[in-house]
Image (cartoon, rainbow, N blue to C red):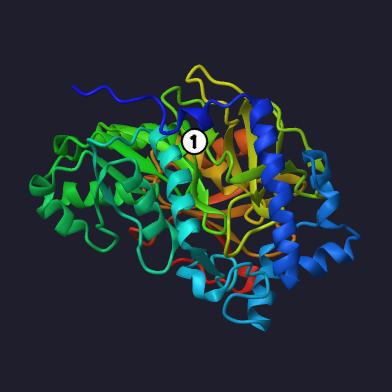
Amino acid sequence: MTTWARYFDERLETMPPAWTRRLEEEGLAQQVTRCYERAPFYRQKLDGAGVRPADIRHLEDLARLPFTTKEELRVSQAESPPYGDFLCADPLDVVRLHLSSGTTGKPLVLSYTERDAATSAEVGARAFWSAGARPDDTVLHCLTYSFYTGGLSDHAALEATGATMVPAGLGQSRRVLDLWSDLRPTALFSTITYPVHLAETALERGIDPRALRLAKLFVTGEPGGQIASTRRRLEDLWGARVGDTYGLSDVWGTLAGECEERQGLHFCGQGATLPELVDPDNGDQLALAEGVRGELVFTHLQREAAPLLRFRTRDVVEILGLDCPCGRTGFRFTVVGRSDDMFRVRGVNVFPSAVEGLMREHGIDRFAILLDRFPVEPPVRILVEGVDGRERELAQAVRARLDFACEISAATLPHSEAKSKRLYRLYEGEEAPA
C-alpha cells in the first residue's frame, strides 16, 4: 500500500502565522494598488471612502477598505456587460468564464485568466488533499458541469491532486451504476444530496451501496458535511468516509477541507486569499479566534481577471481552532449557515442547517420549511417526507432544541440529484414544492 505525504503543499499549509501574515500583507498592498489603477469600480469605491492604495500596507489597514457585495457586482455587470467595470485584466487574457450559482438573484459572470485557473486548481488541491484525495483515487465527479464553478474548476483541482477523474456530472445515475465495475471508482465528489439519491437508485435495482466498495465521499455545496447526523447517514449508507469541503464560486471553487482529525474545515487559501470575520449585522471586524462566530469576508491576493476586495460571503461560520494535530496552520471552522437564509421566529434566529441536523437525527432526508408571512410567526410549517406518523414527536424535538413552534405535515417532496432546497419564502412569491 502506497504511503502518501500528509500535505499537498507543506510549506504553505504549515507556515507559521507570522510568515503567513507577511505573505498576506505583501499580496494585499499589491492587489489594492492593482485594483485601484485598473478598475473604475474599485477606484470609485476607494475614492468615496477617502482611501488611497498607499494607505493599505498592513492587515490592520484592511478595515479602511469598503466592503464589496454581490449586489454591487451585479449592477456593475448590468451597466458594463459582460465583465463589469471591476475587470482588472485585458479581456484578451480571459480564458474561461463561469457563472455564480445565482440562487439569490441573477448569476455573475466570473472571469479567469490562465493564471487564475492555475491558482484555483492549486488552492482546491490543497483542500481536497486535506479531505483525503490521493493520486491512487478514481473520483466520480457528480456536480453539474454546465456554467458553474463546481464543475470544471473543481474537476481541475481534484485532478491536480493526481487523482483520476471521471466527469459523470448529473443525470447519469443509472449509467454510473451500469459502468461501476468498469470504472471502479474509489471516491465520489458531489453535494450532500446526491449520494442519498444514488444510494436510493442502487437499492431500487437491488444493489446494496456498501457492496460497491466506495471508500471516500467528498462533499460540498451544502452544510450537512459538518452535521454529525448527516455524516453518519452517508457513511452508513455507503460504508465510506466523508470528507467535507467548502468554497464559493465568486472566490475559489474550493478553498477549505477537513483533515483526518475531522475537527472542522481547514482554510487552505494561504497566499491566494485573505480571510476576515465580521459581525453580519454591522460589519465590524471580529477576531479569528476559537469560539468566535461571524460572517466570512474574503480578499483576493492572487486573482488577475476579477479580484474581490473585502467580499461579503453571507456565510456565517464558527471558528473551532487555530491549530491542529495534523500540523496545518489554516484556521478551522464550521459553517453555521447563510445569513440570507436565516429567519427569525419571535426573536429566535433559525438556520435551515440546524433544522437539517435535527431531521437527519430522526432519519429524515427530505424536508421543506415554508414561511407564509413576514415577520415570521409560529407555528412554522415544515413539510416532511418519511415522517411515518411521528409528526408530533418531531415538532416537539424542534421546539425543545431550536426554540420555535412548528407544524409538521407529511408530504411527498421532489427528488433531485442536485442540491436540495430547504427554505421557501412564500411571502416573496416563491412557490411551495409540489
Question: For the residue labelled by badge 1, is the local secondary structure a helix, a strand or a loop?
Answer: helix
Q: How crowded is the residue under tag 1: few (<14 C-alpha within 10 Å), some, or many (20+)?
A: many
Q: Is residue 116 left or right of residue 177?
A: right
The one nearer the camera, 181 or 153, is: 153
Tell me, yes or no, if residue 264 can be seen here. no
Residue indicated by mark 1 = 226
Tell me, yes or no, if residue 303 can be seen here. yes
Image location of residue 170, percent across then percent down? 29, 61
Q: Is residue 213 above or below residue 63?
A: above
Q: Quadrant of residue 305?
A: bottom right
The one nearer the camera, 356 or 31, is: 31
Q: Residue at x 63, y 40 (%)?
A: 317
Q: Residue at x 88, y 61 (%)?
A: 49
The one nearer the camera, 250 or 23, is: 23
Q: Is residue 379 above or below residue 83?
A: above
Q: Is residue 258 above or below residue 43?
A: above
Q: Is residue 252 left or right of residue 297?
A: left
* Residue farthest along the top direction in this orientation: 325
Image location of residue 7, percent across then percent down? 42, 28
The amino acid type of the residue labelled 1 equals Gln
Image location of residue 187, percent across then percent down? 26, 40
* Residue farthest along the right direction in this orientation: 50
Q: In which quadrant is the N terminus drawn? A: top left
Image location of residue 167, percent across then percent down? 26, 57
Q: In which quadrant is the C terminus drawn? A: bottom left
Q: How many marks?
A: 1
